[in-house]
Image (cartoon, grey):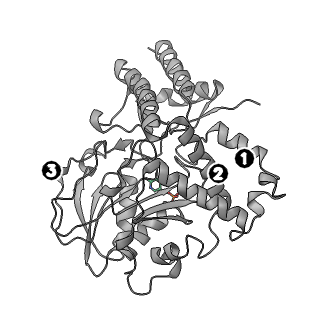
Amino acid sequence: MERIFNFSAGPAVLPLDALQQARDEMLNWHSSGMSVMEMSHRGKEFTSIAEKVEADLRELVGIPMNYKVLFLSGGASSQFSMVPMNLLREKKSADYINTGMWSKKAIKEAQRYCNVNIAASSENANFTYAPTQDQWKLDQNAAYVHYTPNETIGGVEFNWTPDLTHLENNIPLVADMSSSILSRPLDITRYGLVYAGAQKNMGPAGLTIVIVREDLLGETIKNTPSMFNYKIHADNSSMYNTPPTYAMYITGLVFEWLIKMGGLVEIEKINLTKANLLYDLIDTTDFYHCPVTKSDRSRMNVPFTLKDEALDAEFLKQSHARGMLQLKGHRAVGGMRASIYNAMPIEGIVTLVEFMKEFANNHA
Ligand SMILES: *Cc1c(COP(=O)(O)O)cnc(C)c1O
């Protein structure tokens, strides 16, 4: 069986090791006589899986005990509502940094519940950079500050962590890490809350992980549905209702793979090598162009255009024939986008770079 190099932005490539183990355990998990899909989420088998998934994530990131880890469904998009519903805590406004399509969606939902102060925006430059913190106009009365560390569509990444320690009111920092979580070390103590859909860098679609500081829980806005109340999920160890059990299991296999690889310090080195290979090629030819400011380029999602967009279709056709799929850029940006998450092997990048060189030479 031939596996292709899958550059999809999400759902995305998964580590072959994890998929093979899932295949081997598909019909009979650890002599239980059942597939993980068939298990009660409250039975001892799945309880042991769920506990290991959480323990491995805590080990990978280094999550202290005053942070809860929640395994939810509803996608990162549900978090756009859950964050204001749970974190406004009687406050009337929240600060948002607007750096692209996903920030905008988060802002649009938050506006249902509070005044949104756009503390900084890169919209004037077509979302091609990450505003430095000296450009942020933060409000001392904001309930929290929300930003998107990696804009999946624009390929813009904050390669630094915002620092809110100078603010008087202990305002929590909130991050939508859907497309960059676990791609590098993460100091969770700098954040009040981090959320991420699993399907970019952790596992299959259907699972959303929330890491939240315990003291922020318990005060929701009026009429918050139980399913949108973090405290209820935390108090029930994410078993208030049926969690996405199979997605949690696969995500657990991905965590085991990451630990075996050497954790986040090691994966960051590999990710840097991979991203540099691709950006170096883009920058050394005038055939390819990446619109993003160099310091703010994403290590996970690499957008680029060809010199002549009339060649786009031919580029996609030929790369497809060489076993590289999903390179078409998002319709909002055009051109190409190579998503190169943790599980994209370096061979995939080497194959892509070789092809890009050849394609540029043939169409110079
Ligand atoms: C994909 C993505 C989302 C949306 O995730 P869903 O799980 O589809 O709701 C939100 N934010 C970012 C940064 C993303 O990349």
Between the residue at mark 3 and the residue at mark 1, the CA separation in whole angstroms equals 47 Å
What residue is shown at x 66% (from left), y 65% (from top)?
Answer: 47
* Three-letter amino acid code at the position of disc 3: Asp
Classify mark 1: residues with Cα within 10 Å, few (<14), some (14-19) or many (20+): some
* Three-letter amino acid code at the position of disc 1: Ala
Which is nearer the N-term, disc 3 or disc 2? 3
Residue behind mark 3: 134
Between the residue at mark 2 and the residue at mark 1, the CA separation in whole angstroms equals 7 Å
Question: How far from the left and from the top, in percent, is residue 79?
Answer: 45, 66
**Does the CB distance between marks 2 and 1 fall below 8 Å?**
yes
Residue behind mark 2: 250
**Residue 84 visible in the shown view:** no
Q: Which one is in front, 13 or 237?
A: 237
Q: Is 179 placed above or below 69 here?
A: above
* Three-letter amino acid code at the position of disc 2: Ile
Instruction: State the SS at label 3.
Output: helix
Which is nearer the N-term, disc 2 or disc 1? 1
Residue behind mark 1: 22
Question: How far from the left and from the top, in percent, is residue 335?
Answer: 45, 35
Classify mark 2: residues with Cα within 10 Å, few (<14), some (14-19) or many (20+): many
Q: Residue furthest bottom?
A: 222
